[in-house]
Structures are given as C-alpha cells and as structure tokens.
Image: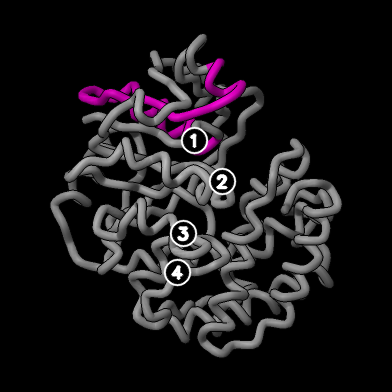
Amino acid sequence: MKICIVGAGAIGGFLGTRLAITEGTRVSALARGATLAALRTHGWRLQQDGMALQAPAVASDDPAALGIQDLVVIAVKGQSLPPLAASLASLIGPDTIILPALNGVPWWFSESLPALRGRPLESVDPGGAIARVLPLPKIVGCVVHVSASTPEPGLVEHKMGRGLIVGEPDGGESERVSRLAALFSRAGFELTCSSQIHYDVWYKLWGNMTANPVSALTGATMDRVLDDELVRELCAQAMREAGMIGTRIGCPIDQTPADRMAITSKLGVFRTSMLQDAQAGRTLELDALIGSVREIGQRVGVKTPTIDALFGLARLFGRTHGLYP
C-alpha cells in the first residue's frame, strides 16, 4: 500500500514510523524545513518503549513528486491545512482514502452531520475550500489517542497511548474501514472501528478543548490545572456548554465533567500539545479546538459565555505572542 503522511510532526511521525516498519507498505512524507531535512538524512525515527525504531523515508515538499497514493494521512495542525489543501490534489486518485488524524473538529465534521445542514464551518474550513479538494466520499474519520512529542525535528518520542478509532462519516460499515483497521493493527495500534465517529470526535474534543488553551495560557501541566479548584470549575462550566451543544448535534455525552477530569488526572504530569506548541513558538490550533465549538454553538442556538471567554483570552494570548493570526 502506498501511504503518504502529510505533516511528519509528533503524531504524523509516530504513525509514519510505525507504518514504515510494517510489511507491505511504502510510506512517504510531505514535509518541509528542518523536518524534511531530517527525514532525508535519517529516515523515520521513533523512540518507543525504550527502543529506537528507524526506517528509510521518501520525503518531499512537493506533493506532485510523491504521486497518487492509496492512503493519505493528514496529520498537520488544523490551522495549517487551509493554505495547504489545494496542493494535495496531486496525491489523490480515484481510489485514494483520506484519513484526517487531526485534533479538534475536522473540516468534514459538519458536512456529514444533519444538525449542521452540511454547511462548512468557517472556523476550520473558510469558504469550504478544503472540502472541495478533499471531498467527503474519500474521507474515513479518525480519532487519535496518542501522546507524543518531537524533541528535535524528525525524531518522535512516544509518551503514552496507541489508540486509533476509525469509522465512516455516515456511520455504515465498509470494506475500506476493515482494511485500514487491519493495516494499523499490524502496525501496532489498538484499533476500534466505530459506527459513530462524530461522537468519538466530539468526546475527545470535550475532554481537551479546555485543557489545551488553559495550559497554554498558564504554562501549567495538567496536574496543576486540575489541582486548582477555580480553574477546574472554569473548565467544567465550558464542558457543560459543550455538552449541551453535543446533545443538539446528536453527540450526547453521559459523563459529567468531574468524571472526565478523573480520567485525565490518572495520566499524571504531562504537557498538552498546545502547551508544547506555545513553548516552542509554534502557532496554536485554537480554531479547531475551541473556535469551532463556539461556531457550532451559534449554529444550534446554545449560548457559550464560558467558551467565548476562554477563546477570547487564548486568542489574545496567541496574538500577543505571534502564535495566532
């Protein structure tokens, strides 16, 4: 199977390395800058379970040089996709599967959700430009439950988790989902085939839409965020608002914020992905993680004063530090 990883950062590099060492795959990377140079020099590199894994990599900053793929895994940050999307057309043929391994709300989410009437979300797909190039019929939904970091360009350090959830946006079963499940299982992932991938996206978002911006704003690891009763209540109130939105769009969550925080607290001391980005001077994926929730709330008539305040503060922080446009 010909596979292209678009964005070989922490998650893309983890997926790419595991797939590259799996028999029967040809894995390439669309990358740029220092990551591209590292892939060309060293190949795929992953530190996991005390082992150093490595595999040759074909890497380019030109999609046309990589050609049509069987599977395109999109692992860039949400804010990086709109300017990149049009160039990805050269990777996509009649039978290509597109697997978005993204945080937050992906561009295809509203298009396949009746409650949102198929209209694109301006926060993640301005004008529907991404959907025109990466159309819904080619999408298999994906939720990644992995924690990883990049101590240097092209080198991934796995922290915890191997979970992948995949499913058709329309909720049906399909041969292509079964093929992807078999592929990623062989590559060492814990696979779940889901008939409700919208819910899986929303549930993960419900858990990290507050943790990420709060940690970026404060510089605090998650244990410290959850230990502060005032901050914990702020996060809980935002989660209640998102829970009401979930009910309106057909993704009801039967946990309480306290239930979800108890799960998170078991992970101990860790830096969220947005905190890692803020500390490294990388742009923040605020739109996919919280701006999109605010927009969906407006669409379905749910007021979101806490989410609005958190988004405003995080946006101002990002703009002040040159991390958000």
Residue extending furthest top?
41
- Spatial distance from mark 1 to mark 3, Cα to Cα? 15 Å
Lower sequence index among marks 2 and 3: 2
Q: Is residue 271 left or right of residue 17?
A: right
11 part of magenta stretch: yes
* Amino acid type at mark 4: Pro
Residue 296 x/y as whole percent = 54, 77
Asked whether 49 or 140 is in front, the reply is 140
Sequence order check: which comes first, mark 4 or mark 3? 3
Disc 2 marks which residue?
A: 80
Q: Amino acid at mark 1?
A: Gly
Q: Nearer the viewer, mark 4 or mark 1?
A: 4
Badge 3 is on which residue? 106
Residue contact between numbered discs 4 and 1, judged by CB atoms under 8 Å? no
Badges 2 and 1: C-beta atoms under 8 Å apart?
yes
Left or right of 291, for residue 202 = left
Image: magenta residue range: 10-38
Q: Position of residue 193 (x, y in %)?
A: 27, 56
Badge 3 marks a residue whose secondary structure is: loop
Rounded to the nearest whole Å, what is the CA distance between mark 2 and mark 4? 17 Å
Q: Residue at x 61, y 21 (%)?
A: 34
The reply to whether residue 317 is visible in this rendering is: yes
Identify the residue at horizontal 33%, vertical 70% (top origin).
Answer: 112
Which residue in the protein does label 4 denote?
120
Considering the numbered disc 2 on the image, is that residue within a helix, a strand or a loop? helix
Identify the mark at residue 150; answer none if there is no mark: none
Give the left or right position of residue 54, taking residue 91 as reference: right
Q: Earlier in the sequence, mark 1 or mark 3?
A: 1
Per the image, label 4 sits on a secondary structure element best described as loop
In the image, residue 73 lies at what x, y percent? 37, 41
